[in-house]
């Protein structure tokens, strides 16, 4: 190999490494859409997986009067009748229970689990 090409090869390798590392950091999606249903004492899905730092965008289809609560994240949202949307930014790892805090709803089964890696 001709030595005059070594500096060019070194520059290309560095550029390739920078691109690889940058893409690696950006590979995790910053947002995740959750199709969410709420109704007569149920939530669907009953479990959600997310990554720390993601913003979850809930696209909600709700019938009746319900809430969406996660105590550990200090988050509460009243769910209006029909279609709506809300966002939840998850900033810490853990396993969190979400539930409806209306009387009897959580006990009746209106809850789920958010897993954050």
Image (cartoon, helix red, strand yellow):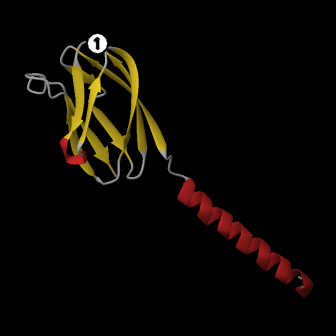
Instruction: Identify the residue shown where x is 29% and y is 44%.
Output: 115
Please provide percent x and percent y for residue 8: 85, 77
**Which quarter shows the N terminus?**
bottom right
- Judged left or right of residue 39, residue 49 is right
| Residue identified by numbered label 1 | 63
Q: Is residue 110 above or below residue 30?
A: above
Instruction: Identify the residue shown where x is 8% and y is 26%.
Output: 107
Please provide percent x and percent y for residue 70: 22, 39
Farthest bottom residue?
3
Numbered label tally = 1
Please provide percent x and percent y for residue 113: 24, 37
| Tag 1 secondary structure | loop
Local crowd size for mark 1, using a 10 Å CA cut-off: few (<14), some (14–19), many (≥20): some
Q: Quadrant of residue 42?
A: top left
Q: Which of 80 and 48 is in front in this view?
A: 80
Please provide percent x and percent y for residue 66: 22, 21
Instruction: Identify the residue shown where x is 38% and y is 52%.
Output: 52
Q: Which of 110 and 89 is in front in this view?
A: 89
Q: Is residue 92 above or below residue 48?
A: below
Q: In which quarter of the image is residue 85?
A: top left
Q: In which quarter of the image is residue 4?
A: bottom right
Q: In this view, does 48 lie above or below 7?
A: above
- Judged left or right of residue 62, residue 2 is right
């Amino acid at each position: 190999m001709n030595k005059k090409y070594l500096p060019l090869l070194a520059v290309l390798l560095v550029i390739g490494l920078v691109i690889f590392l940058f893409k690696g950091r950006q590979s995790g999606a910053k947002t995740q859409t959750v199709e969410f249903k709420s109704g007569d004492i149920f939530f669907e899905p009953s479990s959600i997986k997310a990554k720390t730092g993601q913003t979850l965008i809930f696209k909600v289809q709700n019938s009746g009067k319900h809430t969406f609560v996660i105590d550990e994240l200090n988050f509460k949202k009243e769910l209006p009748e029909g279609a709506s949307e809300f966002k939840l930014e998850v900033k810490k790892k853990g396993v969190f229970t979400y539930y409806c805090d209306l009387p009897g709803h959580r006990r009746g089964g209106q809850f789920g689990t958010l897993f954050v890696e």
